[in-house]
Image (cartoon, helix red, strand yellow):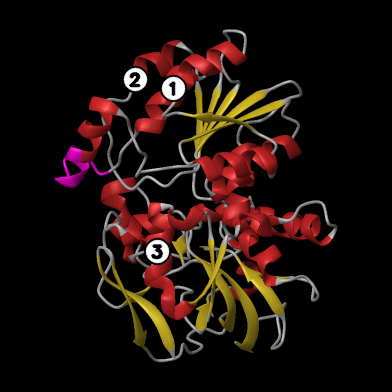
Amino acid sequence: MKAICWHGAKDVRVDTVPEPKILNPRDAILKVTSTTICGSDLHIYSGYIPSMQKGDIIGHEFMGEIVEVGSQVQRLKPGDRVVVSSIIGCGQCAYCQTHRWSLCDNSNPNGGLQEPLFGFGTAGIFGYSHLFGGYAGAFAEYVRIPFADYGAIKVPDGIPDEKLLPISDAFPTGYMGADLCDIKPGDIVAVWGAGPVGQFAMLSAYMLGAERVIAIDRVPERLQLAKTFAKAEPINYEEVDPGEVLKEITGGRGPDACIDAVGLEAHGMGLEGFYDEAKQTVRLETDRPHVLRQMIVAASKGGTLSIMGVYSGFVDKIPMGAAMNKGLTFRMGQMYGQKYIPMLVDRVANGEVDPSKVFTHTMPLEETKQAFELFKHKRDNCIKVLLKP
């Protein structure tokens, strides 16, 4: 079959690889009908995620049709149309049983590789390095789904793929970002990053009762989508100081909650931006924490910081004094897909929301390299690319 494989930083290729097979009786094999590049895939593309190996199949946001199931799969059968959570959970451990799926004890066979970095191993993720299990990803014609009864969620026929595909990863990530804010009536929520996850975080903040939602980005078309799709108030941080504007529009209080939908490749301004990029380039710092610094200073006293942008290792110059003395709460993590996906499928099926609004381009899987360049550099007003095998 054809698959998109990683061969190095900014080097992804169309390779011919063997089709996946059932390896465990709880597996299923999926024929991929649609997939897409996630913002966190850019970190792999740019070479910032450790433990990638040449030939690894990448991609983790996808859906399709079940074509084969293992002997112990109970909830699925060939022909079922499903959305697949990017997070792999066993469904049986204490973390999965309490709906903290990305902390699964059993789905990452390489958890020991994470212990020097994280202290403990976390869940496996499709196509996201050997740190997260070394699983083959979804930029392929077929993919093996471990623990299929828990990760592949049936979806209705008659709804186009583009309305369901973001529920695999971007929509539940954004929703979890808002959910972690413990939003109360009257709250003001600021979201850094108006890419797909940021758009869904803004939309979800309103769904959970926020009074006002503010979008912070520098790309005009993303800010425009935030205004029209998510009904957020846009701030272009290249034109104004977002911290000062947030103070002004919140009456000097600051936002009650701040959501990081950017992660380790945050774009900084001036000397701070140069400092982070230089240190990351020579690996003296793995991540660029510009957004984290801004959120800590901008948040209201007693506010909440929700971090959904991916971070891979170590950062510095974090204003912990401000965080501690302001009594901030930090909440974060890889998304709990299996917790949120069924609810979001219902909302789409009921016509409450149309996630397809984030897609600006549709391209064949063979053009994934070009799609990465469009997405990474925001060319041709690109916000998200739908890929078709």
Residue 374 shown in magenta: no
Distance, label 3 to label 1, CA atoms, is 31 Å
| Residue 302 appearing in the image | no
User: What distance separates the C-alpha of mark 3 from that of mark 2?
Assistant: 33 Å
Q: Nearer the viewer, mark 3 or mark 2?
A: 3
Residue 147 position within the rendered picture, expressed as x and y whole percent measured from the top left? 57, 73
**Which range is magenta?**
278-286
Q: Is residue 284 magenta?
A: yes
Tell me which residue sits at (46%, 63%) in the image.
125
Label 1 close to label 2 by CB (< 8 Å): yes
Task: Please identify, in this view, whether the residue under mark 3 or under mark 1 is nearer the observer.
Answer: 3
| Kind of residue sitting beneath label 3 | Phe
Left or right of 93 on screen, residue 316: left
Q: Earlier in the sequence, mark 3 or mark 1?
A: 1
Residue holding disc 1: 296
Q: Position of residue 164 (x, y in %)?
A: 69, 65
How crowded is the residue under tag 3: few (<14 C-alpha within 10 Å), some, or many (20+)? many
Q: On the image, numbered disc 3 is attached to which residue?
A: 372
Please tell me which residue lies in front, 53 or 376.
376
Residue furthest to the top: 252
Amino acid type at mark 2: Pro
Residue on which the image places disc 2:
319
- Classed neighbour count for the residue bearing mark 2: other residues with Cα under 10 Å, few (<14), some (14–19), many (≥20): few
Which one is nearer the viewer's eye here, 154 or 147?
154
Identify whether 212 is placed above or below 160.
above
The residue sitting at 71% across, 85% down in the picture is 77
The amino acid at mark 1 is: Ile
